[in-house]
Image (tube, rainbow, N blue to C red):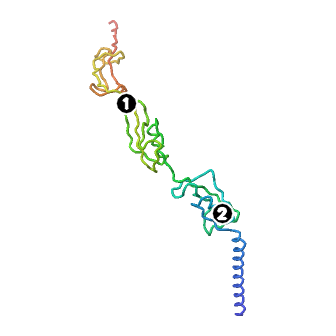
Amino acid sequence: MKSGCLGNIIFAAVVVLAFGFSTYVWFAFFVRGKSVSTPNLIGKSVTDAKAICSDLGIVLDVDAQHRRNSDRIAAGNIAWQNRTPGTTSLIKRGTRIKVELSSGPLVLRVPDFAGERAGTAVLRLGQQNLKPGNMSYVDALQQGVLAADPPKDTVVGAQTPVSLLVGAAPPPPPFVMPDLIDHPLDQVEAYPGIRDGIIIRQFPLRGAPVSARDPITVVVSRQEATAIVEQPPG
């Protein structure tokens, strides 16, 4: 009885080993034999990449419409591929590998802000991966950005601060508020005890600084109308 069980165990082990060996042989000769490891083409020139792909029986597809900025890969060399390289990443012969070329480091230039509002210029700096520096305002007939430091079209690094000189309309000339109290005014307001058309209150007060843009409020008098009440005959 024991010898029968032992025989069954040995038979099962032989079957498992045979199945495993046949699976390995089938994978090695039929699957892997028709597949290759995905090559690492990053950093390679197009000529070298084509030679590598030709030796492996795969096709190199260079994207002519798109490029990628890279600080490490020279312009014109491969900066990206659509398949992960490595021995564990197998592809069949005849597979196309799509790649994009490097356009070199990203070149940032100070934009031309001439005539733009300060807020618009600050927004554009953020969009260009730059940041605003000092903001100075001067009285000028021409409003908006007058100059930038560094100047427009200067090649700069990322997050470089750019200072702006902004023209603003000059403020109106200042005046000293005169004393309007007791002076007449055509538009009147009823006020008991004071004759019509006399200014009785003003704002701003006398001596306050004002400009041509500031509103001036005055209150003027108008005598109240009096009604005559006739007594009925006694």
Seen from the viewer's position, the closer of residues 209 and 97 is 97
Judge the density around disc 1: few (<14), some (14-19), many (≥20) Cα neighbours within 10 Å.
Answer: few
Q: Is residue 112 left or right of residue 80?
A: left
Q: Is residue 217 above or below residue 60?
A: above
Residue 152 horizontal/vertical position (percent): 46, 41
Q: Which three-letter amino acid code belongs to the residue tagged 1?
A: Pro
Q: Which residue is mark 2?
A: 53
Mark carried by residue 46: none
Element under disc 1: loop
On-image quarter of the C terminus? top left
Residue closer to the observer: 156 or 21: 156
Q: Is residue 81 left or right of residue 24?
A: left
Residue drawn at x 51%, y 51% is: 106
Q: Counting residues from the N terminus, which is met first, the one under dot 1 or under dot 2?
A: 2
Residue assigned mark 1: 170
x and y, in percent, of residue 137 in the image: 38, 37
Position of residue 90 measured from the top left corner of the image (x, y, whole percent): 65, 67
| Screen quadrant of the N terminus | bottom right
Q: Amino acid at mark 2?
A: Cys
Kindly check if marks 1 and 2 are in contact, taking CB atoms under 8 A apart as contact. Answer: no
Q: In terms of depth relative to the viewer, which is nearer, 165 or 77?
A: 77
Q: Give the label, 1 or 2, closer to the camera.
A: 2
Q: Position of residue 135 (x, y in %)?
A: 39, 41
SS state under label 2: helix
- Residue at 72%, 90% in the rendered image: 7
Identify the residue shown where x is 40% and y is 34%.
Answer: 167
